[in-house]
Image (cartoon, rainbow, N blue to C red):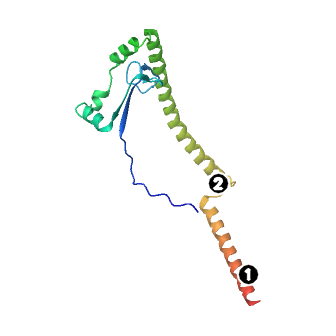
Amino acid sequence: MTAPRPLSPKGVRFNSVEVREYPRILGDNPSVSAGPPITLDWVHNQRSSVSLPLEDWEKYRENDRRSKQEIKVPDYIRTDWLIDAGFSGADLQRTVQEIEQAKKDRKVSITKSDFRDKTDVLTENVKRKFGRVIGRRQRTDSLYQQWKEKGEKTTRREEEEGGRRSTM
């Protein structure tokens, strides 16, 4: 038998922060409102990475918090960043066109999906009602009634058999 492990307090604690820089690259996210999307590369610049105690990081950042509006990057700034990173105007234009097409495809898909869902429900209702009219299918409530009656018969039979066993 193993000894029980001591219970640890609930919660998570951090004691340091590692700040890394990742290169900005041309993205593919169709949710961008305008212009080319940016994303971060997978590989970070190890030479510019810094590890700090959490308290120092919090002191450094306390007056540097940004609002959601300040975090949004306008399309002309994203374009400048990507060109500075080595992407050509043709790369940016091609990506923007691909994203616009993806947005159109999503709209079509959503519209078709809504329509398809509605037609599927309608088709099922028509099949069910038509099946009842020509007598191939019973109403759900009559099927429930049959199931209930069968269950009652089974229960009565089990009770009768139980009574016979106890008298034997």
10 Å neighbourhood of mark 2: few (<14), some, or many (≥20)?
few
Three-letter amino acid code at the position of disc 2: Arg
Residue at numbered disc 2: 132
Residue 54, quarter of the rendered image: top left
Q: Residue at x 39, y 53 (%)?
A: 10
Three-letter amino acid code at the position of disc 1: Glu
Give SS at disc 1: helix
User: Up-down: is 137 above or below 18?
Assistant: below
Q: Residue at x 33, y 16 (%)?
A: 76
In this rendering, position of residue 109 left or right of residue 86: right
10 Å neighbourhood of mark 1: few (<14), some, or many (≥20)?
few
Quadrant of the drawing holding the C terminus: bottom right
Q: What mark, if any, has residue 161 been given in the picture?
A: 1
Quadrant of the drawing holding the N terminus: bottom right
Say which of marks 2 and 1 sits in front: 1
Q: Mark 2 or 1 closer to N-term?
A: 2
Q: Residue at x 63, y 69 (%)?
A: 148
Distance of label 2 from label 1 (alpha carbons) = 38 Å
Q: What mark, if any, has residue 21 been given in the picture?
A: none
Give SS at disc 2: helix
Q: Residue at x 53, y 61 (%)?
A: 3
In this rendering, position of residue 114 left or right of residue 61: right
Residue 150, quarter of the rendered image: bottom right
Towards the viewer: 60 or 111? 60
Towards the viewer: 97 or 72? 72
User: Up-down: is 166 above or below 82?
Assistant: below
Towards the viewer: 116 or 72? 72
User: Up-down: is 156 above or below 131?
Assistant: below
